[in-house]
Image (tube, helix red, strand yellow):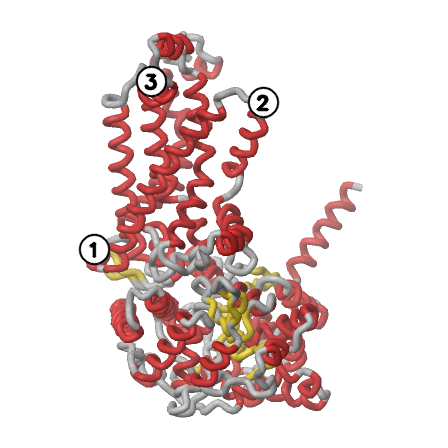
């Protein structure tokens, strides 16, 4: 409506300037109704619940203030989950960024058959995390697993991928990386196709090797994308890892692959500890708020834009 | 024409309202979904005025969660199947009508026909809260064909922990590289087996007589009975004679056994029908036996597992009455026989067993008899009646975590047990705080 061509309903409202002020808000109402009922209200309710001890059926609520948080930070299992999350997320992010960048470079080489490779590589993105988990669990199954069989037959790696340390975590990381990678590749490919040819040509003329070109020119040019992907990957590993962990290891062995989100699931839906679980979700909220803040704060400043 | 349609519509509406509609949620997956539906269909044939809407609501855990959500939203189902370890939570929730109240009012119903072993579990403070429906316990399944191959007597299954260890080692086959081709035994990595082997040795899990004479206040399972079982598990695993599954992965254990990758399996009797069928298909001879017991331990028995039917309150009287009719029907001898023979969960009533005996069923299906006899021959003590604990699901997870830590050599069996008991007590205290 910016250029003053008001639709006919506005004439009914009389004062055009007034309606111009109100109209945007009216248009936002449907969105806000959805956001408020499904995001803000539950979030606010979680904040409230995090200060209570709640019985499983919600028939008893006792105000405990910040005791739930205190309990969590004294709970060794919760602290272990924090450590696990840190290791799992950082290792996965590093691997997924490195792999997807490399694969994107290869896909960008315009060799015959690239569309087929692209299609094959993008498939995991279309699969739900639970199915991805089932697939990988099947491959590594100690009885019928194809990968497990070959590893033990040819390389003598005869381990139980679900119940042994550290293999359970390795399997979870592999699965998550496989699942998230296509997302990153899409962004990297788009980025690579936007790098001006003349920059690279100039570098070639200056005698730069392809290694130098890749790491000194291409990678820095793509740094905004990398930064964005790191943030997005942190979010997806922290949250969507739930289904994969549930299917592949169920948080085991022990609580070795129990991440914060899996711990939250257990406390909320397996043990019915609503208050504690609400406190955990508040902690996750704070972590995410920090990550998002970093993204908005540094995303605009530090990262090299062309 | 239009008038006719309106009349028709009105008649339809009246007819559909005349039927009493009740909701039944259950957690029996796979082909049991159809089995339960067929039971409900039979009920509706007998009671044309009642419509039972049967819904499979996922695992036991999911079903309880859905019930909680439905209760909070104000539209709970009439009948819901809740696992045995949810009993205390259901009682504390105060949303169910205790079965006892309806039984006392209904003169046609004789609870005396039910098995005391089963009733004892669901009776808390002398009151029956829910209707037993699917009850099971664990037994030892073994592959007689592999027994023969290993030079073991197929008619002498292991009876003690010592024998179990010896047999499992003999049944383990390694190839030239030292890879395990066939393992001796498996059972799901589930705390249920810990509880059962405690009961087998007549040892309690929690204080106040397993929570039966008062609300449990602390865990008491850190003693020799538990340690014997932990050590057995540890040694079986470390010698390569046992394959372990993921936490609570029942299917994986079944698959190891069915594919003859392991020679013995300890799992629920609810799989008798399935495993018998698979043994026939895969061409091996199946044997079943009672759970082995440490030589020096006291004699106990097994605890029933499974689930029961809860009647949720807050519905109109007419609907509650219809729901009670349905519950009675599901617990009737005919339905219990149908359920028993199609799954392996045992009938929860005595007259059903009598009828099956008359028909010669157990002569033809000896494995079903193993399950039943093991329960009937169990000593009835507080320890074999099963523990009543509020945060039972969490305690199970704690025990499973402790076992996995032990198997990964993070903790010795002694440390794992001590840690589990401490954490379990913490969980109980935390739960009890809400109800003080």
Q: Are marks 2 and 1 in contact (CB under 8 Å)?
A: no
Q: Which residue is mark 2?
A: A112
**Which chain letter matches label 3?**
A
Where residue B17 appears, as percent x and y from the top left, is 64, 58
- Indicate which disc residue A73 carries: 1
Q: Residues within 10 Å of mark 3 (few under 14, many from 20)?
A: some
Q: Gap between marks 2 and 1, in whole Å? A: 55 Å
Q: Residues within 10 Å of mark 1 (few under 14, many from 20)?
A: few
Q: Are marks 3 and 2 in contact (CB under 8 Å)?
A: no
- Indicate which disc residue A217 carries: 3
| Looking at the image, residue B235 lies above or below residue B370 | above
Where residue A17 appears, as percent x and y from the top left, is 34, 12
| Looking at the image, residue A195 lies above or below residue A130 | above
User: Do tags 2 and 1 sit on the same chain?
Assistant: yes
Query: Which callout, 3 or 1, points at the residue further toward the start of the chain?
Result: 1
Q: Gap between marks 3 and 2, in whole Å? A: 26 Å
Q: Which secondary structure, mark 3?
A: helix
Where residue A219 appears, as percent x and y from the top left, is 34, 23
Viewer-nearest residue: A151 or A31:
A151
């Amino acid at each position: 409506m910016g250029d003053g061509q008001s639709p006919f309903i506005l004439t009914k409202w009389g004062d055009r300037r007034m309606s111009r002020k109100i109209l945007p808000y009216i248009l936002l109402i449907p969105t806000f109704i959805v956001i408020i009922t499904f995001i803000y209200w539950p979030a606010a309710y979680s904040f409230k619940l995090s200060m209570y001890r709640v019985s499983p059926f919600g028939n008893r609520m006792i105000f405990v203030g910040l005791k739930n948080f205190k309990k969590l930070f004294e709970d060794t299992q919760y602290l272990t989950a924090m450590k696990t999350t840190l290791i799992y997320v950082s290792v996965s992010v590093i691997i997924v960024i490195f792999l997807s960048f490399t694969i994107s470079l290869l896909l960008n080489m315009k060799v015959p058959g690239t569309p087929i490779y692209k299609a094959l590589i993008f498939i995991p993105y279309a699969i739900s995390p639970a199915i991805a988990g089932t697939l990988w669990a099947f491959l590594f199954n100690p009885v019928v697993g194809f990968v497990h069989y070959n590893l033990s037959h040819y390389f003598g790696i005869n381990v139980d991928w679900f119940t042994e340390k550290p293999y359970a975590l390795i399997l979870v990381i592999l699965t998550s990386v496989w699942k998230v990678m296509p997302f990153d590749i899409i962004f990297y490919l788009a980025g690579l196709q936007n790098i001006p040819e003349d920059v690279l040509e100039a570098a070639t003329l200056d005698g730069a090797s392809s290694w130098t070109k890749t790491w000194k020119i291409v990678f820095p040019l793509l740094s905004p994308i990398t930064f964005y992907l790191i943030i997005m990957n942190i979010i997806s590993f922290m949250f969507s890892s739930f289904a994969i962990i549930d299917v592949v290891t169920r948080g085991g062995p022990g609580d070795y692959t129990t991440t914060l989100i899996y711990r939250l699931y257990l406390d909320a839906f397996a043990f019915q500890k609503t208050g504690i679980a609400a406190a955990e979700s508040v902690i996750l909220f704070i972590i995410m708020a920090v990550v998002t803040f970093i993204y908005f704060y540094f995303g605009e400043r530090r990262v090299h834009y062309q | 024409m239009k008038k006719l349609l309106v009349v028709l519509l009105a008649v339809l509406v009246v007819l559909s309202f005349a039927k009493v509609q009740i909701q039944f949620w259950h957690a029996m997956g796979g082909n049991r979904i159809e089995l339960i539906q067929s039971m409900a269909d039979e009920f509706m044939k007998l009671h044309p005025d009642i419509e039972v809407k049967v819904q499979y609501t996922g695992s036991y855990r999911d079903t309880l969660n859905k019930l909680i959500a439905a209760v909070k939203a104000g539209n709970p189902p009439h009948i819901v199947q809740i696992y045995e370890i949810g009993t205390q939570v259901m009682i504390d929730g105060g949303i169910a009508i205790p079965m006892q109240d309806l039984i006392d009012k209904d003169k046609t119903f004789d609870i005396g026909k039910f098995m005391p072993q089963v009733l004892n579990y669901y009776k808390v403070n002398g009151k029956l809260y829910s209707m037993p429906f699917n009850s099971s316990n664990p037994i030892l399944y073994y592959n007689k064909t592999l027994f023969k191959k290993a030079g073991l007597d197929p008619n002498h299954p292991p009876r003690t922990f010592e024998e179990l260890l010896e047999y499992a080692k003999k049944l383990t086959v390694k190839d030239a590289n030292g890879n395990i081709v066939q393992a001796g035994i498996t059972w799901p990595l589930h705390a249920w087996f810990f509880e059962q082997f405690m009961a087998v040795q007549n040892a309690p899990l929690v204080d106040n007589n397993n929570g039966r004479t008062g609300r449990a206040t602390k865990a008491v399972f850190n003693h020799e009975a538990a340690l014997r079982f932990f050590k057995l598990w540890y040694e079986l695993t470390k010698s390569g004679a046992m394959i372990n599954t993921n936490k609570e992965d029942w299917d994986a254990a079944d698959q190891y056994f069915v594919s003859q990758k392991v020679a013995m399996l300890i799992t629920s009797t609810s799989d008798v029908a399935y495993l018998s069928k698979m043994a026939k298909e895969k061409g091996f001879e199946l044997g079943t036996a009672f759970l082995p017991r440490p030589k020096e331990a006291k004699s106990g028995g097994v605890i029933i597992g499974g689930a029961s039917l809860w009647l949720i309150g807050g519905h109109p009287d007419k609907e509650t009455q219809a729901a009670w009719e349905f519950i009675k029907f599901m617990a009737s001898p005919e339905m219990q026989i149908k359920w028993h023979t199609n799954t392996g969960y045992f009938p929860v009533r005595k007259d059903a067993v009598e009828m099956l005996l008359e028909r010669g069923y157990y002569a033809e299906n000896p494995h079903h008899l193993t399950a039943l006899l093991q329960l009937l021959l169990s000593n009835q003590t507080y320890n074999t009646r099963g523990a009543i604990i509020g945060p039972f699901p969490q305690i199970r997870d704690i025990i499973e975590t402790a076992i996995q830590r032990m198997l990964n050599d993070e903790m010795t069996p002694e440390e794992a047990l001590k840690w589990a008991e401490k954490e379990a007590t913490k969980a109980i205290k935390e739960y009890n705080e809400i109800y003080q």
